[in-house]
Image (cartoon, grey):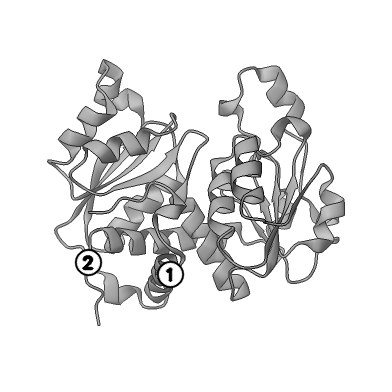
Amino acid sequence: MRHMLNPLDFSVKEIDALLSLASDIEHNPPKYAHVCDGKKLATLFYEPSTRTRLSFESAMLSLGGSVLGFSSADSSSAAKGESVSDTIRAISCYADIAAMRHPKEGSALVASLASSIPVINAGDGGHQHPTQTLTDLMTIRSLTGRLGHMTVGLCGDLKFGRTVHSLINAMVRYPDTRFVLIAPDELRIPSYIREDVLKANHIEFKEVNNLDEAMPDLDILYMTRVQKERFFNEEDYIRLKDCYILDKKKMKLAREDMYVLHPLPRVNEISTEVDSDPRAAYFKQVQYGVYVRMALIMTLLEVEKPC
């Protein structure tokens, strides 16, 4: 039995195979409509989510399986003080696989140690968000035809953004990947990412404050929102939330083959006027997320790929 707790749980070869499976699902959805008949997915979401939770549910339903679970801690026995370990032990009696989101780092690991079914980390605090990373990798590969040999700009909340941390961890394993880290000083990448991931793997990167100056060099621009829920006081949030706003004027500085990604939800860091630009890929990204999660569910349940 395997779990998906962080992007490094799968080798590059395994991720490439999973992305290829997701691509086949994209192009041949009817072939996969019943591969999980009789299987149940439990969605254990201790904090709010729209895309990730519904994407998991859509993925399982598209495979022919069914879904059960809860969408907030208040609607679960966590409100009564039940531990994550006890919850997953109980859920293991009801479901074949579980996707869990929790505000505390390491919660998915705690669940996996007590679980008798595969556990997928759907986001734990500011730590990891591996299925979003798989979605990002599929989006980049589908749009550019490659992973690696590119410059990736990461912009906004690089301190608390678990999607950013997961994506860096994943992409350093591909050759000739360079990063431009665009953030205000207060939201720079954590030192453990800088030292233990980027520098330790001899990855070329630079940290800048100015988005305009970075735009012409990028193959991918990965925008993130400044997350109000990660701040300890509202004053800091208000001061930083509008640091970077991508609009048509800034898009004119970018190459014609650069793509804009965003894990969503956005607040105002990407102007809606950018949505019509063919380089805006963030809603395609949402659709790719369903295919990736379908492939991951199949892989962890060891479901045989249909002919």
Which is nearer the eye, 287 or 254?
Answer: 254
Upstream in sequence: badge 1 or badge 2: 1
Q: Which residue is mark 1?
A: 13
Q: Which amino acid type is marked by label 2?
A: Val
Which is nearer the eye, 54 or 92?
Answer: 92
Residue pictured at 70% horizontal, 41% vertical: 156
- The residue carrying pointer 1 sits among few (fewer than 14), some (14 to 19) or many (20 or more) residues within 10 Å by Cα, namely few
Residue pictured at 48% horizontal, 33% vertical: 125
Q: Is residue 71 visible?
A: no
- On the image, the x and y values in percent for residue 12 come to 46, 65
Mark 1 or 2, closer to the camera: 1
SS at circle 1 = helix
Question: Vertical placement of 43 versus 12: above or below?
Answer: above
C-alpha distance separating marks 1 and 2: 19 Å
Occupied quadrant, residue 136: bottom right
Q: Which residue is mark 2?
A: 303
Quarter of the image with the N terminus is bottom left
SS at circle 2 = loop
- On the image, the x and y values in percent for residue 39 come to 17, 56
The furthest residue to the bottom: 307
Q: Which amino acid type is marked by label 1?
A: Lys
Residue pictured at 81% horizontal, 62% vertical: 217
Quarter of the image with the C terminus is bottom left
Residue pictured at 38% horizontal, 46% vertical: 5
Which is nearer the eye, 173 or 154?
Answer: 173
Q: Is residue 95 visible?
A: yes
Locate residue 201 relative to residue 301 in the image: left or right. right
Locate residue 4 relative to residue 269 in the image: left or right. left
